[in-house]
Image (cartoon, rainbow, N blue to C red):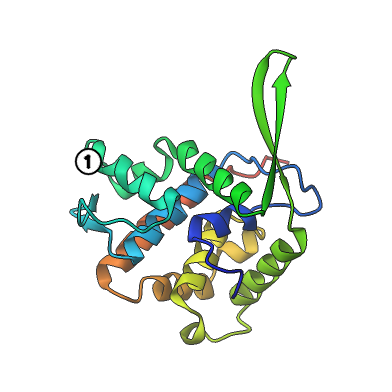
Amino acid sequence: MSHGPLSLPARLCLLAWDTARPAVNDTAQLPGLVRAGALVDLARRGLLTDEDGIATPADLDSRTGDAVLDGLLELIHESRPHSWRTWVTLRARVTLDAVREQLVAEGWLRAEKRRVLGVFPSVEYALERAAAVDALRRETRQVLAGSVPVAEVSERDAALAALAAAAELFGGACARGRRVGELAGRAGAASPALRGIVTEVRGAVATAVPAPASP
């Protein structure tokens, strides 16, 4: 996939957008999904490591140059130790807000300031590049559908698809099956530790997805 230098959390934020409703993008699981992408992105870069199930900064002085990822790295460094699953949801809206600000700065979103009840300041976000987001969604669907062999999918795109499936962005059917498991393995192909991290983070995202209502 192309779409420039967008980070994994930024791609997930855009991927979750319903382009038919370009001003709506705030589901209950979105903060956790975006945070999951940031955790996996940092782990893939070797800046977060696993120590007995705890997400641990590998080097206190290392930075990515990406404000969202560096902000999360600093937050983890300054906080008491937590598991990967805990970090998926702990203060996750901080990461989502940072991603949205980044996407506004890069022209993907438009920020609209409003007042709730005419008093409380609020910001709503509208999608600016719907065609590009549609293309991203189409390409991710193709990865999940199996049109490209797993071995030929990049590790980043495999992570994107596996996390999107865990959040059921394309429906429950895409969230299950052997293909998704293979993509998750591909996302963590660099090392056994990374595979374990991807598994933990995917599990946390899947747990956060609301159960379907009873008929």
* Residue 95 placement (x, y as % from top left): 47, 43
Quarter holding the N terminus is bottom right
Mark 1 crowdedness (10 Å alpha carbons): few <14, some 14-19, many ≥20: some
Q: Residue at x 66, y 58 (%)?
A: 171
Q: Point out residue 30 in the picture as x, y percentages from the top left corner.
A: 57, 45
Residue 81 horizontal side relative to residue 189, left or right: left
Q: Is residue 60 left or right of residue 6?
A: left
Residue 51, by quadrant, is: bottom left
Report the side of 42 relative to 25 (left or right). Answer: left
Q: Is residue 170 above or below residue 88?
A: below
Q: Residue at x 40, y 52 (%)?
A: 69
Which quarter of the image is occupied by the C terminus?
Answer: top right
- Residue kind at label 1, given as amino acid type: Pro
Vertical position of residue 165 compared to residue 102: above or below: below
- Residue under label 1: 81
- Depth check, front residue: 117 or 107: 107
From this viewpoint, is residue 199 visible? no
Question: Residue 101 location, x and y as percent?
Answer: 57, 43
Total tally of numbered discs in the picture: 1
Picture residue at 61% right of the left edge, 69% below the top? 3
Q: Secondary structure at mark 1?
A: loop
Q: Position of residue 44 (x, y in %)?
A: 35, 66
Left or right of 73, for residue 161: right
Residue 197 showing in the rendered view: yes
